[in-house]
Image (spheres, rainbow, N blue to C red):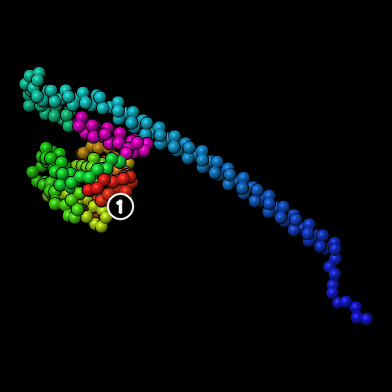
């Protein structure tokens, strides 16, 4: 009779191996539990920080809105008083007095623009600006802008030119917000252009309309192209120091363009002028039901 050749392992060795495997599994389980506790603690910390950030953002928006609202009344009073003085309601003015009052009026108008920008920024950050789309003619938009800037074209060496729109003649979007973006572009272009021209155009590209404001002004170096659309950013140049502002106009324009489903753009080189653009869809996409054109 042949003896079986199979080998039976030692039960003690099996128990030892099983015990070691259980210990390793327990160690891994403890390590996993520790990792999970760390992840939960990290999530809790992130939630706390996010809550603090939301509170800080809300507080900033409330402060900007309150400050802007409270500034409007005294600024309006200053503008009214300067208008009365310049109209000679209380009698004639000397040349020097008229010069000083004109300076006060110009400064108060600058403050009005700053306050309006701050208030609009606060509304955008708080999500309290609604898009109110409607059909409108591009020629009417350009005509309104032309009339708005005609009184401020005081430099005979700079021309403001509006080209005929190319493509569709109508848009379904928020006319007021689009106009505000273009006003910011044109105002900046006129400020920083000493001679030459500021040219406004609108060209259809597929399902979008591209509005451009080009100038022959001081231009912007490439390293500033991204930063210039951020809040409170102003470039360090002699003309920037001479012309006051909040640095909010372009930031606000970027946010308004995004509300309209579009985006802003910039092509510029220092000393060679700039082209600021805003691209918006022909029909705003989140407008709900759109009426027929």
- Which segment did they paint magenta? 107-130
Indicate the position of residue 162 as horizontal and vertical percent values: 14, 48
> Main SS type for the magenta part?
helix
Indicate the position of residue 281 as horizontal and vertical percent values: 28, 51
Report if residue 109 lies within the magenta region.
yes
Q: Residue at x 86, y 77 (%)?
A: 5
Would residue 181 be seen by someone viewing this image from the given angle? no
87 horizontally vs 116: left or right: left
Foreground residue among 159 and 7: 7
State which quarter of the image contains the N terminus.
Answer: bottom right
Q: How many marks?
A: 1
Q: Badge 1, how many Cα within 10 Å: few under 14, some, many 20+?
A: few
Element on which disc 1 rests: helix
Instruction: Residue under label 1, please give it.
Output: 223
In this view, the residue farthest toward the front is 292
In this view, the residue farthest toward the right is 1
183 horizontally vs 10: left or right: left
Foreground residue among 105 and 132: 132
Q: Residue at x 28, y 46 (%)?
A: 290
Would residue 126 be seen by someone viewing this image from the given angle? yes
In this view, the residue farthest toward the bottom is 1
278 horizontally vs 56: left or right: left
Q: Residue at x 32, y 28 (%)?
A: 67
Q: Residue at x 22, y 50 (%)?
A: 211
Indicate the position of residue 214 as horizontal and vertical percent values: 18, 51
Report if residue 77 lies within the magenta region.
no
**176, above or below 73, in the image:** below
- Which image quarter: residue 10? bottom right
Indicate the position of residue 287 as horizontal and vertical percent values: 31, 45
Foreground residue among 174 and 219: 174
């Amino acid at each position: 009779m042949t003896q079986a050749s199979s080998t039976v392992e030692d039960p003690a060795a099996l128990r030892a191996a099983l015990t070691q495997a259980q210990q390793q599994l327990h160690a891994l389980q403890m390590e996993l539990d520790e990792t999970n506790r760390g992840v939960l603690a990290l999530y809790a910390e992130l939630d706390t920080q996010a809550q603090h950030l939301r509170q800080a953002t809300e507080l900033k928006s409330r402060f900007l809105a309150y400050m802007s609202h409270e500034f409007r009344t005294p600024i309006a009073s200053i503008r009214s008083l300067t208008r009365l003085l310049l109209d000679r309601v209380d009698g004639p003015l000397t040349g020097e007095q008229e010069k000083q009052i004109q300076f006060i009026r110009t400064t108060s108008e600058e403050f009005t623009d700053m306050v309006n920008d701050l208030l609009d920024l606060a509304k955008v950050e708080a999500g309290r600006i609604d898009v109110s789309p409607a059909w409108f003619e591009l020629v009417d938009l350009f005509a309104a802008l032309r009339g708005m800037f005609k009184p401020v074209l005081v430099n005979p060496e700079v021309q403001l030119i509006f080209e005929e729109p190319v493509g569709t003649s109508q848009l379904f979007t928020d006319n007021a917000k689009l106009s505000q973006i273009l006003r910011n572009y044109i105002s900046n272009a006129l400020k920083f252009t000493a001679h030459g021209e500021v040219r406004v155009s609108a060209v259809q590209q597929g399902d979008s309309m591209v509005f451009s404001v080009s100038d022959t002004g001081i231009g912007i170096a490439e390293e500033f192209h991204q930063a210039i659309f951020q809040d409170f950013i102003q470039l360090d140049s002699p003309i920037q120091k001479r012309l006051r502002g909040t640095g909010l106009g372009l930031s606000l324009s970027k946010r308004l363009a995004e509300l309209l489903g579009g985006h802003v753009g910039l092509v510029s080189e220092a000393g060679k002028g700039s082209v600021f653009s805003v691209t918006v869809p022909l029909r705003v996409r989140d407008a709900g039901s759109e009426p027929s054109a």
